[in-house]
Amino acid sequence: MIKLHDLYFKTFISEQELDATVQRMVDEIANDLQDEIPVFVGILNGSFMFVSDFVKKYPKPCEVTFIKLASYEGLKSTEDIQRLIGLTQDLSGRKVIILEDIIDSGNTLEEVHRIFKNEHVDELKIATLFAKPESYKKDFKLHYVGKEIPNKFIVGYGLDYNGLGRDLPAVYQLKTTQHMTNIVLFGPPGAGKGTQAEFLKDKYNLVHISTGDVFRYNIKNETALGMLAKSFMDKGELVPDQVTIDMLNAEVEKNAGAKGFIFDGFPRTNAQAKALDNLMDAKDSQIDAMIALEVDDEVLVGRLLERGKTSGRKDDADESIIRNRIIEYYNKTAILKDYYAAQYKYYGVDGVGSIDDITERLNAVIDKL
Ligand code: AMP
């Protein structure tokens, strides 16, 4: 995710996909033109990256020139197109291919056709990297379209938002929901996730979701979900993924206006991590960090047995169940460290020490995000 001026944008089209799209357009156009030497006319400013990559890939001789038109103001495509630099050479009798970065309402394209009306070119064709069918209002034929995209504002790969973003090698889409901070609090049972989450949620104004707490609430209220979860929890095993994922989705939906979440005890498997990514994606958001509390096993067992004296939790009362929970953690959950580390989102924090000291270590990580 990136911020340009006051707005947030999320990744939309990767460099690789752009490269493949441009290559496809080159192949199609080269095939149609055969041995004809075309004149490619780029529409500045937005098309400069597309034109550059396009002509580098073009397998045969060609000419390149530019015209410069201005249409966008901030986020809006305006009716009023300014012709800043027109055609500077005679193109009569030539095969001309317009290279546009994006065709939105079609107003710029109308101006392009006006410019070429009396040029007596042999052929005028339009190639656009992106088109927004939902907002296109004109009848001009679009001969080559790289990718049709929804009617959302995009930046990158030549396209800007008030001057910024043209230099980005990938394309980003405007986020339409408010910015959230989402943290996965990670670590084995007894690491202190619940205790620390209580401090963090107040300090950063986040919603704390502990899947263990939600299951225990359901068990207490004897719901169907509670009955199902109980059989697994009592043995220290994980509740099946789909049950847990559905429950988590529902908890997130209950807090639609949240400024962000602390996920505690979730995700615990790869399937859950992927489901969480999808959920965040649907909210135009993402997981910002996995912060792991690192604590030795024997310290954990001691802490949980101590907690078991007052927590009333069956899975805290018996050392063999406690050890089974820790084994489940290493078998199924610890691998998630790699999942988030690969995205540079993993932060390990020493989970041994006073509660205040550990809170400070966590704050230091979050403040830098
Ligand atoms: P916790 O309170 O996080 O220690 O969780 C207690 C128990 O709830 C675990 O041992 C599991 O049986 C169940 N549980 C909690 N979160 C999950 C999850 N994300 N996936 C599967 N089971 C879970």
Image (spheres, grey):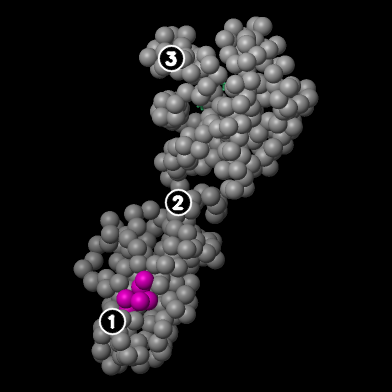
Instruction: Tell me the residue at 28%/56% (across/down).
Output: 134
Is residue 25 within the magenta segment? yes
Q: Nearer the viewer, residue 236 or 193?
A: 236
Instruction: Tell me the residue at 57%/38% (across/down).
Output: 336
| Residue 85 in the image, given as x and y percentages of width and height | 43, 80
Label 1 Cα crowd, 10 Å radius (few <14 / some 14-19 / many 20+): few
Q: Is residue 11 left or right of residue 122?
A: right
Is residue 265 within the magenta segment? no
| Residue 39 in the image, given as x and y percentages of width and height | 37, 86
Q: Which residues are magenta?
A: 24-29
Q: Quadrant of residue 202?
A: top right
Q: Which residue is mark 1?
A: 32
Residue sticking out furthest to the front: 320
Q: Mark 1 and mark 3: span between their CA atoms? A: 64 Å
In the depicted structure, whether residue 101 falls above or below residue 173: below
Closer to the N terminus: mark 1 or mark 3? 1
The amino acid pointed to by label 3 is Gly
Label 3 Cα crowd, 10 Å radius (few <14 / some 14-19 / many 20+): some
Q: Which residue is mark 2?
A: 174
| Residue 45 in the image, given as x and y percentages of width and height | 46, 72
The amino acid pointed to by label 1 is Asp
Q: Which residue is mark 3?
A: 226
